[in-house]
Amino acid sequence: MKLFTSKRTIAVLFFISILFLIFTLIIDLGFYYTRNYPSNVYGLREFMIVFSFLFFSLLIYRQRYIQNKDILFKIKSLFVAILGVYLATALPKFLLPTHYNGTSENLPVLFSSLLTLFHSTFVSIFATLFFIAILFILRDLIYYKSKKGTRRAFLFSLILLLIYIIYEHIQYGASNPDWTFKGRNTFEWILSGSMLFLMMILSLRTAWVNYLNKRQKIITFWVGVLILPGAIALSRSSTYQSIYYYSLTVAAFDAYVAYFIYIYILFFLASILLHLPTASIFDRKMTEIASLHNLSRTISSVLDYDTVLKKVTELTTQVLSSDYCWLEMINHSTRSSEIKSWQGLKKPSPEKKTDKDENGLSHWVVQNKYSILINSVSKDTRARALKSRERDLNSLLAVPLISKGDVIGILYAAKKTEFGFDNEDREMLQAFANQATMAIENANLLKESIERERLAQELKVAHDTQLKLLPKEMPRFNGLDIGGVCMTANEVGGDYYGFVSLDDSHLGILMGDVSGKGISAAFYMAELKGIAEAYGKIYRSPKELLMQINSVLYRNTDRQTFVSLIYAIFDLEKNQVIFSRAGHCPLLIVSGKTGKLQALQPPGIGLGLDEGPIFNRVLEERKLSLQMNDVFLFYTDGVTEARNPEGIEFGEARLKALLEKSSQKSAEEIRQDIVEQLVNFTSTAKRHDDLSILVVKKTG
C-alpha cells in the first residue's frame, strides 16, 4: 500500500473515482430523458461503478481511523461507520421521498422517475463508502493475533461473494428481481449459506477481547449494545431496495458487509460476557507486572534513599489493594527497627528493640527469614501488639527483605477484612520485596557516600543481588539432567538464565543477554526476569510469551537497549521441545541416538527493537522430538567470542566439537568441560563479556 501514500497519488485516485461516478450519473440521465436503455451498456456501467469504489477503497484504507490499531478506537470508529450507513439510507427517505413504481417503457426501475434516480444514486454512493470502512475495521478486528488460516478464510469469503455477484449478473443481468430470499435457486442458497457459515467462523476470532481490561470490556460491551440495533436494521433486505436498483454489485457487497457486522457484533458481545467474570483477575496480573516494572525502573533511576522507601510502600498498596502498608527497616548494629515509610497508618510506631520483642511479628520474621500470612489477626498471638494499635486491621502479610543473608527490613501489607490474602499474594509480595531489596541497597549505598570507592562497593552489592536473581540450584525435574553457570564481566552483567515450572511434565527454560555491560545491563535483565516469570504461567507458547515480553520492553526501555532471548518448553508428557529465539545464539543439539550435532537458529529479532508488527511476523516457533540422551546447549555470545591473549576467538566450531566429544557425559560434567576449556583458552586475557552456559540432557 506504500504506492498510495503520496498526496498527488491520492488526489488522482479521488479525481478518477469522482469522474467515474459523475460519468455514470450522466449516462443514467441520458437513459432517463431518451427513455432508452441499451442492454449492451449495462456491463460498462457496472464496470465504472465497481472501479470507482475500488479506488475509493484505496483512499479509505489510508485514513487515520483505519490505520489506528487501538481496539477501543476501532470499536468507536465502527459505531460511527454504522451510524453513517444508517443516516445515508434513512435521511433520503425524509429529504427525497420517493416510491418505486416498478418498470415503465421497458426501462429498469431506477429510471421510473428523476427523483428515484437521484435517491438511489445518493443512497448507494454514501452507504457503500461507509460499508467499505466497516469492512476494513472488521478485517482488523478479525486479524488481531490471528493465524494464516483466518486470513485465508476471510479471503475465501470474499471470493464466494465475487462468485455470487457474477452469477447474479449472468442470471438476471439488467433486470430487477426481488432483493430478498424469496425465489432463490439451489445454487444461490448454497453460495449464501457458505458465506454465512464463513462469517460465523470468522466471527469467532475475537482474540482482542482478551487484551482489554475490565473497564475497557464494559465500555466495549455497551458500545456494542448501542450499535447492535443499527446493525440489525442494516441487515434487513428493505434497506437495499434502492441500492439494488442502482447496482447489483454494490447491493450484494453492502448486504454481505451488513450481515457480517451483525453476526460479528453478536459474537463479540457474547465473548465479552464470557470474559467479564475473569477480567478482574487479568487486570490484577497486569497491575502486578506493571508495578514490578515500575519498581525495576526505580532501581535504575531513583537514587534517593527516602524516595525509594516511599515508592516501595506506594507500589505495594497498589499491587495488593491493601488498606495499610508499611516498611520497617532493621538496624542490626543497634538491634532495633523503625518504620521508615507507610500508607494508611494513623501514626507510625516509634523505634523499638527487636531483641526484646521476642513474641512479636518482627522478631519472628527476622529469626526465621521467612514470610508470614495471617488471615485472622485477632487469633494470632504474634500480632497482639499490632492489633491493639490498629483495631481495624484483620488480615496481614509480612515478608523479609534479605541482603547478604541478613534481614535488612520487613515489608507489611494489611487489610481491614479477614482472609484478605492468599498464598499467591504472599509469593507476589516476596518477589516484590526481592526487587525492593535491590533498590533499597543501591539507594542506601549512595546515601552513605558518592565517592569512587563507595560506587565500586555499590556495584559489588548489585552484583550479589543480580546473582540472587539466578537460580540458586538447578531444578530437579524427573527425566532431565541440568547443569548451568553464569560468569559476569565488569562485576555485573546482563546475562540471565532461569526456569519456569509449568507443571510436573512441563519445564520452561530461558536464556537471555542484554545489550551493553555493567549495572545497567543487569538491571534490565532483572526487569526481564520479573516480566518473564509473571507472564510465563499465563502464556504456554514460547512465541506468545516472547511477543508479550517484547511489547512490554518496547514501551518501557530506551531504543539503545535490546535483549536477545531464547525460550524453550520441555514437554516430557509428549517427549517434545518447543522453542523460539529472539535474536539469540543458536540452540545446539546432539542426538542421543546418532551422536550428530545440529545448530538450530529459527528467525527472530531482539526484544525491544520493534513495537510488534515486524517482531511478531519474523518470530517462529519450532517443535522437536525429545529422545533419550539428547543433549541441548543454551549459551550466550560471550562463550564463542571469548578471546585468548593473541586476540583469537574461541569460536562456534570449537564449542560444537567440544559438545560432541562430551555428549556422553552428564549435564554438569559437560558444563565443567566447556568452562575448563574456556579458562584454558583465554588464559590471562581479560574477559570483556558475560558468558552463560546451560546444558540439558534427556535421561528418562
Image (cartoon, rainbow, N blue to C red):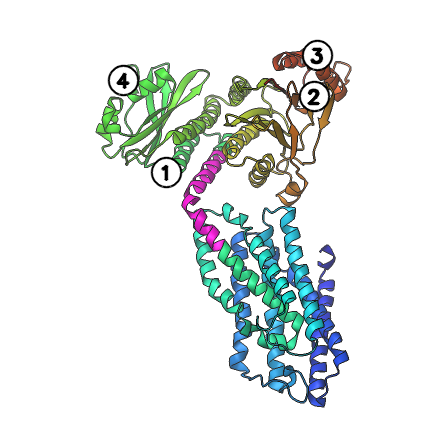
Q: Which mark is residue 309?
A: none
Residue 449 image position (x, y, % from top left): 48, 21
Residue 437 lies within the magenta run = no
Q: Which residues are magenta?
A: 268-294
| Residue highlighted by disc 1 | 321
Q: Give the mark nearer the N terminus: 2 vs 4.
A: 4
Left or right, residue 386 beside residue 429: left
| Residue highlighted by disc 2 | 591
Label 4 is placed on what type of residue?
A: Asp
Mark 1 vs 4: CB contact within 8 A:
no
Give the distance between the C-alpha atoms of the residues marked 4 and 3, in whole angstroms. 54 Å
Q: Secondary structure at mark 1?
A: loop
Give the number of the mark in front: 2 or 4: 2
Instruction: Check the image and report above or below for 209 versus 550.
Output: below
| Residue highlighted by disc 4 | 357
Q: Give the mark nearer the N terminus: 3 vs 1.
A: 1
Q: Secondary structure at mark 4?
A: loop
The quadrant in which the C terminus is found is top right
Task: Specify few, some or many for label 2: CA neighbours under 10 Å numbering under 14, 14-19, or 20 or more.
Answer: some
Give the distance between the C-alpha atoms of the residues marked 3 and 1, in whole angstroms. 52 Å
| Residue highlighted by disc 3 | 677
Q: Nearer the viewer, residue 319 or 357?
A: 319
